[in-house]
Protein backbone atom coordinates (compact mmCIF):
# COMPACT_ATOMS: atom_id res chain seq x y z
CA UNK A 1 0.00 0.00 0.00
CA UNK A 2 2.88 2.30 0.87
CA UNK A 3 4.65 1.99 -2.44
CA UNK A 4 1.45 2.44 -4.45
CA UNK A 5 0.93 5.50 -2.29
CA UNK A 6 4.06 7.03 -3.73
CA UNK A 7 3.05 6.08 -7.24
CA UNK A 8 -0.32 7.62 -6.72
CA UNK A 9 1.18 11.00 -6.06
CA UNK A 10 2.71 10.92 -9.51
CA UNK A 11 -0.60 9.72 -10.85
CA UNK A 12 -2.64 12.50 -9.28
CA UNK A 13 -0.15 15.03 -10.59
CA UNK A 14 -0.61 13.97 -14.18
CA UNK A 15 -3.93 15.67 -14.88
CA UNK A 16 -2.66 18.83 -13.23
CA UNK A 17 0.39 18.86 -15.46
CA UNK A 18 -1.82 18.29 -18.47
CA UNK A 19 -3.77 21.39 -17.53
CA UNK A 20 -0.60 23.45 -17.12
CA UNK A 21 0.64 22.27 -20.50
CA UNK A 22 -2.70 23.08 -22.12
CA UNK A 23 -2.64 26.56 -20.65
CA UNK A 24 0.91 27.08 -21.92
CA UNK A 25 -0.09 25.98 -25.41
CA UNK A 26 -3.11 28.28 -25.41
CA UNK A 27 -0.98 31.15 -24.14
CA UNK A 28 1.59 30.61 -26.89
CA UNK A 29 -1.04 30.72 -29.64
CA UNK A 30 -2.91 33.58 -27.96
CA UNK A 31 0.17 35.81 -28.30
CA UNK A 32 -0.20 35.96 -32.08
CA UNK A 33 -3.98 35.69 -32.31
CA UNK A 34 -4.64 39.43 -32.60
CA UNK A 35 -1.94 40.01 -35.27
CA UNK A 36 -3.05 36.93 -37.19
CA UNK A 37 -6.66 38.14 -37.16
CA UNK A 38 -7.91 34.97 -35.51
CA UNK A 39 -10.56 36.74 -33.42
CA UNK A 40 -14.11 37.38 -34.46
CA UNK A 41 -17.09 38.82 -32.65
CA UNK A 42 -20.49 37.27 -32.48
CA UNK A 43 -23.48 39.32 -31.42
CA UNK A 44 -26.40 38.11 -29.35
CA UNK A 45 -29.57 40.19 -29.74
CA UNK A 46 -31.51 41.42 -26.73
CA UNK A 47 -35.27 41.52 -27.11
CA UNK A 48 -37.12 44.45 -25.58
CA UNK A 49 -40.30 43.01 -24.11
CA UNK A 50 -42.39 46.17 -24.37
CA UNK A 51 -41.74 46.83 -28.06
CA UNK A 52 -41.22 43.20 -29.03
CA UNK A 53 -38.18 44.33 -30.99
CA UNK A 54 -34.41 43.96 -30.83
CA UNK A 55 -33.06 46.76 -28.64
CA UNK A 56 -29.38 45.90 -28.77
CA UNK A 57 -26.70 43.24 -28.69
CA UNK A 58 -24.00 41.73 -26.51
CA UNK A 59 -20.65 41.25 -28.24
CA UNK A 60 -19.08 37.86 -27.51
CA UNK A 61 -15.52 37.04 -28.48
CA UNK A 62 -14.74 34.02 -30.66
CA UNK A 63 -11.26 32.63 -31.27
CA UNK A 64 -10.50 30.20 -34.04
CA UNK A 65 -6.86 29.11 -34.11
CA UNK A 66 -5.53 27.18 -37.13
CA UNK A 67 -3.92 24.56 -34.88
CA UNK A 68 -6.25 24.48 -31.87
CA UNK A 69 -9.51 25.06 -33.71
CA UNK A 70 -12.21 27.06 -31.94
CA UNK A 71 -11.31 27.79 -28.30
CA UNK A 72 -14.06 28.79 -25.83
CA UNK A 73 -13.75 32.18 -24.13
CA UNK A 74 -14.26 30.30 -20.87
CA UNK A 75 -10.85 28.77 -21.58
CA UNK A 76 -8.84 31.65 -22.98
CA UNK A 77 -10.19 34.80 -21.29
CA UNK A 78 -8.63 33.77 -17.95
CA UNK A 79 -5.28 33.24 -19.64
CA UNK A 80 -5.60 36.53 -21.50
CA UNK A 81 -6.24 38.22 -18.15
CA UNK A 82 -3.36 36.54 -16.32
CA UNK A 83 -0.94 37.61 -19.07
CA UNK A 84 -2.54 41.06 -19.51
CA UNK A 85 -3.09 40.24 -23.17
CA UNK A 86 -6.71 41.09 -22.41
CA UNK A 87 -5.77 44.79 -22.58
CA UNK A 88 -5.08 44.91 -26.36
CA UNK A 89 -7.65 42.17 -27.02
CA UNK A 90 -10.32 44.04 -25.04
CA UNK A 91 -9.51 47.25 -26.89
CA UNK A 92 -9.95 45.41 -30.19
CA UNK A 93 -13.29 44.01 -28.97
CA UNK A 94 -14.56 47.47 -28.05
CA UNK A 95 -13.39 49.05 -31.32
CA UNK A 96 -14.87 46.23 -33.38
CA UNK A 97 -18.16 46.37 -31.43
CA UNK A 98 -18.51 50.10 -31.99
CA UNK A 99 -17.74 49.69 -35.68
CA UNK A 100 -20.39 46.96 -35.88
CA UNK A 101 -23.06 49.23 -34.37
CA UNK A 102 -22.06 52.11 -36.64
CA UNK A 103 -22.34 49.80 -39.69
CA UNK A 104 -25.81 48.77 -38.55
CA UNK A 105 -26.79 52.42 -38.14
CA UNK A 106 -25.57 53.28 -41.62
CA UNK A 107 -27.99 50.62 -42.90
CA UNK A 108 -30.80 52.57 -41.26
CA UNK A 109 -31.20 50.76 -37.94
CA UNK A 110 -30.99 53.57 -35.41
CA UNK A 111 -31.05 53.75 -31.64
CA UNK A 112 -29.72 50.27 -30.93
CA UNK A 113 -27.14 49.53 -28.24
CA UNK A 114 -24.04 47.39 -27.90
CA UNK A 115 -22.91 45.70 -24.68
CA UNK A 116 -19.25 44.79 -24.30
CA UNK A 117 -17.71 42.56 -21.61
CA UNK A 118 -14.92 44.28 -19.68
CA UNK A 119 -12.41 42.48 -17.50
CA UNK A 120 -10.91 43.81 -14.29
CA UNK A 121 -7.43 43.98 -15.79
CA UNK A 122 -8.76 46.41 -18.40
CA UNK A 123 -10.51 48.52 -15.79
CA UNK A 124 -7.35 48.79 -13.72
CA UNK A 125 -5.38 50.02 -16.71
CA UNK A 126 -4.47 53.70 -16.36
CA UNK A 127 -6.08 55.07 -19.55
CA UNK A 128 -9.12 52.82 -19.61
CA UNK A 129 -11.72 55.59 -19.41
CA UNK A 130 -10.04 57.70 -22.09
CA UNK A 131 -9.58 54.70 -24.33
CA UNK A 132 -13.32 53.97 -24.13
CA UNK A 133 -14.32 57.58 -24.83
CA UNK A 134 -11.87 57.85 -27.74
CA UNK A 135 -13.12 54.67 -29.39
CA UNK A 136 -16.77 55.71 -29.06
CA UNK A 137 -16.04 59.16 -30.51
CA UNK A 138 -13.93 57.69 -33.28
CA UNK A 139 -16.83 55.46 -34.29
CA UNK A 140 -19.26 58.38 -34.20
CA UNK A 141 -21.61 56.75 -31.71
CA UNK A 142 -23.60 58.32 -28.91
CA UNK A 143 -21.99 57.09 -25.64
CA UNK A 144 -25.50 56.16 -24.45
CA UNK A 145 -25.52 53.38 -27.01
CA UNK A 146 -22.53 51.69 -25.40
CA UNK A 147 -22.86 49.53 -22.30
CA UNK A 148 -19.92 48.09 -20.40
CA UNK A 149 -20.63 44.76 -18.70
CA UNK A 150 -18.72 44.28 -15.48
CA UNK A 151 -18.96 41.48 -12.93
CA UNK A 152 -19.13 41.62 -9.18
CA UNK A 153 -15.81 39.82 -8.85
CA UNK A 154 -14.26 42.77 -10.65
CA UNK A 155 -15.54 45.09 -8.01
CA UNK A 156 -14.11 43.31 -5.00
CA UNK A 157 -10.64 44.58 -5.84
CA UNK A 158 -9.56 48.20 -5.98
CA UNK A 159 -13.11 49.38 -5.45
CA UNK A 160 -12.30 53.09 -5.15
CA UNK A 161 -10.19 53.27 -8.30
CA UNK A 162 -12.72 51.36 -10.34
CA UNK A 163 -15.71 53.30 -8.99
CA UNK A 164 -13.99 56.55 -9.99
CA UNK A 165 -13.47 55.40 -13.56
CA UNK A 166 -17.01 54.11 -13.88
CA UNK A 167 -18.41 57.41 -12.60
CA UNK A 168 -16.34 59.33 -15.13
CA UNK A 169 -17.60 57.13 -17.97
CA UNK A 170 -21.17 57.32 -16.73
CA UNK A 171 -20.94 61.11 -16.65
CA UNK A 172 -20.12 60.97 -20.36
CA UNK A 173 -23.23 58.89 -20.98
CA UNK A 174 -21.74 55.39 -21.18
CA UNK A 175 -23.98 52.75 -19.58
CA UNK A 176 -22.79 50.25 -16.99
CA UNK A 177 -24.30 46.79 -16.61
CA UNK A 178 -23.73 44.55 -13.61
CA UNK A 179 -23.28 41.12 -15.21
CA UNK A 180 -24.05 37.73 -13.63
CA UNK A 181 -26.11 39.47 -10.94
CA UNK A 182 -26.99 37.23 -7.99
CA UNK A 183 -24.02 34.94 -8.45
CA UNK A 184 -21.77 36.73 -5.99
CA UNK A 185 -22.58 38.67 -2.84
CA UNK A 186 -22.74 42.27 -1.49
CA UNK A 187 -24.46 43.02 -4.75
CA UNK A 188 -26.98 45.36 -3.17
CA UNK A 189 -24.24 47.64 -1.88
CA UNK A 190 -22.76 47.90 -5.34
CA UNK A 191 -26.12 48.76 -6.80
CA UNK A 192 -26.42 51.69 -4.44
CA UNK A 193 -22.92 53.09 -4.64
CA UNK A 194 -21.94 52.54 -8.26
CA UNK A 195 -23.34 54.25 -11.37
CA UNK A 196 -25.05 51.06 -12.56
CA UNK A 197 -27.72 51.43 -15.24
CA UNK A 198 -28.46 47.78 -16.03
CA UNK A 199 -28.86 44.56 -14.10
CA UNK A 200 -28.18 41.29 -15.86
CA UNK A 201 -29.78 38.45 -13.94
CA UNK A 202 -27.45 35.46 -13.89
CA UNK A 203 -28.49 32.42 -15.90
CA UNK A 204 -28.50 30.24 -12.76
CA UNK A 205 -31.59 32.18 -11.58
CA UNK A 206 -33.30 31.89 -14.94
CA UNK A 207 -32.64 28.14 -14.78
CA UNK A 208 -34.74 27.91 -11.60
CA UNK A 209 -37.80 29.04 -13.56
CA UNK A 210 -39.35 25.80 -14.75
CA UNK A 211 -42.94 24.70 -14.97
CA UNK A 212 -43.10 22.94 -11.63
CA UNK A 213 -40.90 25.41 -9.84
CA UNK A 214 -42.16 28.88 -10.79
CA UNK A 215 -43.26 29.87 -7.29
CA UNK A 216 -39.92 28.96 -5.81
CA UNK A 217 -37.86 31.10 -8.16
CA UNK A 218 -36.37 34.27 -6.70
CA UNK A 219 -36.13 35.86 -10.10
CA UNK A 220 -39.22 38.05 -9.64
CA UNK A 221 -37.60 39.50 -6.53
CA UNK A 222 -34.48 40.46 -8.47
CA UNK A 223 -36.61 42.11 -11.16
CA UNK A 224 -38.43 44.07 -8.42
CA UNK A 225 -35.18 45.21 -6.85
CA UNK A 226 -33.86 46.34 -10.22
CA UNK A 227 -37.03 48.17 -11.16
CA UNK A 228 -37.27 49.87 -7.78
CA UNK A 229 -33.81 51.30 -8.43
CA UNK A 230 -34.78 52.46 -11.94
CA UNK A 231 -32.43 49.99 -13.57
CA UNK A 232 -32.93 48.22 -16.86
CA UNK A 233 -33.35 44.55 -15.99
CA UNK A 234 -32.04 42.01 -18.48
CA UNK A 235 -32.49 38.24 -18.16
CA UNK A 236 -29.75 36.19 -19.76
CA UNK A 237 -29.65 32.54 -20.74
CA UNK A 238 -33.39 32.37 -21.45
CA UNK A 239 -33.93 29.01 -23.13
CA UNK A 240 -37.59 28.10 -22.72
CA UNK A 241 -40.99 29.62 -23.36
CA UNK A 242 -41.92 29.05 -19.68
CA UNK A 243 -38.99 31.21 -18.61
CA UNK A 244 -39.96 33.85 -21.15
CA UNK A 245 -43.60 33.92 -19.96
CA UNK A 246 -42.50 34.23 -16.35
CA UNK A 247 -40.16 37.11 -17.18
CA UNK A 248 -42.82 38.94 -19.18
CA UNK A 249 -45.32 38.46 -16.35
CA UNK A 250 -42.87 39.80 -13.78
CA UNK A 251 -41.97 42.82 -15.94
CA UNK A 252 -38.39 42.12 -16.83
CA UNK A 253 -37.31 44.70 -19.46
CA UNK A 254 -35.15 42.63 -21.79
CA UNK A 255 -34.57 39.03 -22.73
CA UNK A 256 -31.37 37.46 -24.00
CA UNK A 257 -30.92 33.75 -24.67
CA UNK A 258 -31.01 30.85 -27.08
CA UNK A 259 -34.84 30.94 -27.14
CA UNK A 260 -34.70 34.20 -29.04
CA UNK A 261 -31.28 33.90 -30.68
CA UNK A 262 -27.83 32.45 -30.23
CA UNK A 263 -24.84 34.77 -30.62
CA UNK A 264 -24.40 35.15 -34.41
CA UNK A 265 -22.25 36.89 -37.02
CA UNK A 266 -22.89 40.44 -38.21
CA UNK A 267 -24.43 39.26 -41.49
CA UNK A 268 -27.00 37.19 -39.59
CA UNK A 269 -27.83 40.19 -37.37
CA UNK A 270 -28.47 42.29 -40.47
CA UNK A 271 -30.77 39.58 -41.78
CA UNK A 272 -32.70 39.49 -38.48
CA UNK A 273 -33.06 43.28 -38.39
CA UNK A 274 -34.32 43.37 -41.97
CA UNK A 275 -36.81 40.63 -41.20
CA UNK A 276 -38.06 42.52 -38.15
CA UNK A 277 -38.29 45.77 -40.09
CA UNK A 278 -40.24 44.44 -43.04
CA UNK A 279 -42.66 42.27 -41.07
P1 LIG B 1 -21.15 36.12 -20.14
O1 LIG B 1 -20.71 37.53 -20.27
O2 LIG B 1 -21.97 35.78 -18.96
O3 LIG B 1 -21.88 35.77 -21.51
C1 LIG B 1 -22.98 34.93 -21.63
C2 LIG B 1 -22.58 33.55 -22.08
O4 LIG B 1 -23.74 32.72 -22.13
C3 LIG B 1 -22.00 33.50 -23.50
O5 LIG B 1 -21.06 32.43 -23.54
C4 LIG B 1 -23.24 33.18 -24.35
O6 LIG B 1 -22.91 32.59 -25.59
C5 LIG B 1 -23.93 32.22 -23.43
N1 LIG B 1 -25.38 32.16 -23.65
C6 LIG B 1 -26.20 33.11 -24.14
N2 LIG B 1 -27.49 32.69 -24.14
C7 LIG B 1 -27.48 31.43 -23.65
C8 LIG B 1 -28.51 30.44 -23.40
O7 LIG B 1 -29.70 30.65 -23.65
N3 LIG B 1 -28.10 29.26 -22.88
C9 LIG B 1 -26.79 28.99 -22.59
N4 LIG B 1 -26.49 27.80 -22.09
N5 LIG B 1 -25.80 29.90 -22.80
C10 LIG B 1 -26.14 31.10 -23.32
P2 LIG B 1 -19.65 32.59 -24.26
O8 LIG B 1 -19.80 33.39 -25.51
O9 LIG B 1 -19.04 31.25 -24.33
O10 LIG B 1 -18.83 33.49 -23.24
C11 LIG B 1 -18.50 33.01 -21.98
C12 LIG B 1 -17.95 34.11 -21.11
O11 LIG B 1 -16.69 34.56 -21.64
C13 LIG B 1 -18.82 35.34 -21.04
O12 LIG B 1 -19.86 35.13 -20.12
C14 LIG B 1 -17.81 36.38 -20.61
O13 LIG B 1 -17.60 36.32 -19.23
C15 LIG B 1 -16.56 35.91 -21.32
N6 LIG B 1 -16.37 36.70 -22.55
C16 LIG B 1 -16.88 36.50 -23.80
N7 LIG B 1 -16.48 37.48 -24.65
C17 LIG B 1 -15.70 38.32 -23.91
C18 LIG B 1 -14.98 39.54 -24.20
O14 LIG B 1 -15.01 40.09 -25.32
N8 LIG B 1 -14.27 40.10 -23.18
C19 LIG B 1 -14.24 39.55 -21.93
N9 LIG B 1 -13.51 40.18 -20.96
N10 LIG B 1 -14.92 38.43 -21.61
C20 LIG B 1 -15.64 37.83 -22.59
CA1 LIG C 1 -21.73 39.45 -20.32
CA1 LIG D 1 -23.50 37.08 -17.86
CA1 LIG E 1 -20.58 34.83 -16.87
Image (cartoon, grey):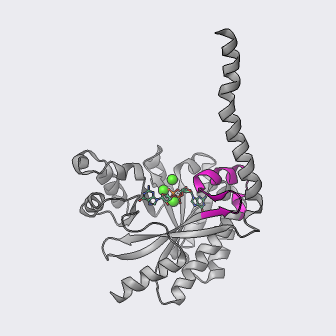
Asked whether 81 or 174 is in front, the reply is: 81
Is 12 magenta? The answer is: no
Residue occupying the point 32% across, 75% down: 52
Locate residue 1 relative to residue 47 in the image: left or right: right
- Residue 195 in sight here: no
Residue 65 inside the magenta-drawn segment:
yes
Residue 95 quadrant: bottom right
Asked whether residue 119 appears in the rendered view, the answer is: yes
Q: Is residue 243 left or right of residue 118?
A: left
Residue 163 drawn above or below residue 256: above
Question: Residue at position x 45%, y 82% from top?
Answer: 271
Of residues 251 and 11, the one nearer the viewer is 11
For this orientation, the residue located farthest to the top is 2
On screen, residue 200 versus residue 5, left or right, reads left
Picture coordinates of residue 119 (x, y %)? 62, 56
Instruction: State the residue at coordinates (37%, 68%).
Output: 260
- At a point 60% along the width and 84% down the height, the residue shown is 140
User: Which x, y percent locates residue 217?
Assistant: 29, 47
Residue 175 image offset from top left, x and y in percent? 51, 68
Per the rendered image, the range of residues in magenta is 62-88
Task: Give the number of marks.
Answer: 0
Give the quarter of the figure containing the C terminus. bottom left
Amino acid sequence: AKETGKNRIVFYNTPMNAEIIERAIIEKHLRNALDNKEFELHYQPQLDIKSGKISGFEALLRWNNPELGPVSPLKFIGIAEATHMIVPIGEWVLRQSCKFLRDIEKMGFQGLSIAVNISMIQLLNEDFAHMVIDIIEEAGLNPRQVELEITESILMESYEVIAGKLKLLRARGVKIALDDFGKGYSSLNYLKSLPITTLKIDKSFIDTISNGNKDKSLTDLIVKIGRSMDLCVVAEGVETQEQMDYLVKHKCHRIQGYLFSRPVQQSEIVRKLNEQYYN
